[in-house]
Amino acid sequence: MSKSKKKELGKGLRALLTNIENTNSPREKTELVKELNSSILEIPLANIEVNPFQPRTEFDAEELSELAQSIKIHGLIQAITVRSVGGDKYQLISGERRLRASKLAGLDTVPAFIRIADDQALLEMALIENIQRSNLNAIEVAISYQRLMVECDLTHESLSERVGKKRSTISNYVRLLKLPPQIQSSIKNNVISMGHARSLAGIDEVSLQLDIFKEVIAKNLSVRALENLIKTHNEPAITPAPKISRELPPEVRKVQDNLSANLGTSVKIKRSDSGSGEISIKFASDKEFNSILSILEKLDD
């Protein structure tokens, strides 16, 4: 980090920020912003507030401690990025992990880039930076993609350009958010891989998703084995039994899927044209049976 670029925040830079806010000339503002963005400034930690749009909510305590120890020895090598919110106050745009570790290390000031950004740009920058982290699980990536599209009003195409990913890659991630909570949790905890998750997301029926997911876990199936298993389910048998679930009215099918997702197991509804029928709930052990009973009892409360 160049020492000539790193300096205490002084009157000259405060004046620069004021000039950026007050100028009406696009050309002058561009030059002032370039000058501001080329400098790394030492800002008091007490003057920096956290980013309210920060998509990351969990930080590993051990990793923070290790980073704090490194900062004590070597200082904060990678500057954080903030924006001015008036006076001597700043709001974090990116680098919350580094900011937290710097506080643990007992620093009074941290090196920072100052950027000019409105709330929309702030949210977008924070989410994009979050996606670029190497240790994100697939669900965290999917949530960030979803937030960028919904909260920043981006299409798959425009998001693809911003994050440098293929449109199909973004679509594959976002589809994971439609999986049942039990499967999403396994993705977050690295019990199954992104390849497993993508294959499971391609199954339309929630109860079948859960059945196959449990088989993957029980038999420790590879992605290729999972794909073959799904293919087997999709191929009609020589003497196929009628698949009642596929003949269900859409509204009943939705109820079946919701029950499967909430109970975390396969639920089948059989219904005749007259409206009579039955609901069957599958369980594999006493523990799962008691878990289902517990959920059903809560529904009665």
Image: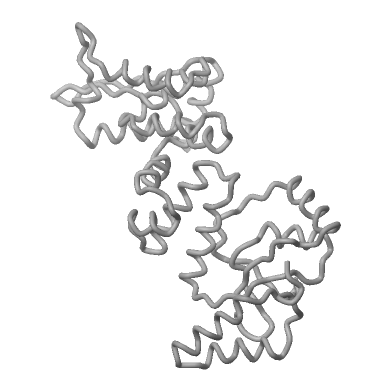
User: Which residue is situated farthest in the left direction here?
Assistant: 273
Residue at 39 percent of width and 23 percent of height: 266
Position of residue 24 measured from the top left corner of the image (x, y, whole percent): 45, 93
Position of residue 101 measured from the top left corner of the image (x, y, whole percent): 75, 57
Image coloring type: one colour
* Residue 249 placement, left or right of 182: left
The front one of 149 and 298 is: 149
Position of residue 275 measured from the top left corner of the image (x, y, whole percent): 18, 26
Residue at 28 percent of width and 24 percent of height: 269
User: Which residue is situated farthest in the top direction here?
Assistant: 239
- Asked if one can make out residue 43 in the rendered structure from this viewpoint, the answer is no
- Asked if one can make out residue 76 in the rendered structure from this viewpoint, the answer is yes
Residue at 22 percent of width and 11 percent of height: 241
Position of residue 265 measured from the top left corner of the image (x, y, whole percent): 43, 25
- The relative height of residue 61 versus residue 93 in the rendered view (above or below) is above
- Image quadrant occupied by the N terminus: bottom right
* Residue 228 placement, left or right of 248: right
The front one of 5 and 187 is: 5
Residue at 32 percent of width and 22 percent of height: 268
The front one of 102 and 74 is: 74
* Residue 254 placement, left or right of 26: left
- The relative height of residue 186 versus residue 21 in the rendered view (above or below) is above
What count of labels does the image hold? 0
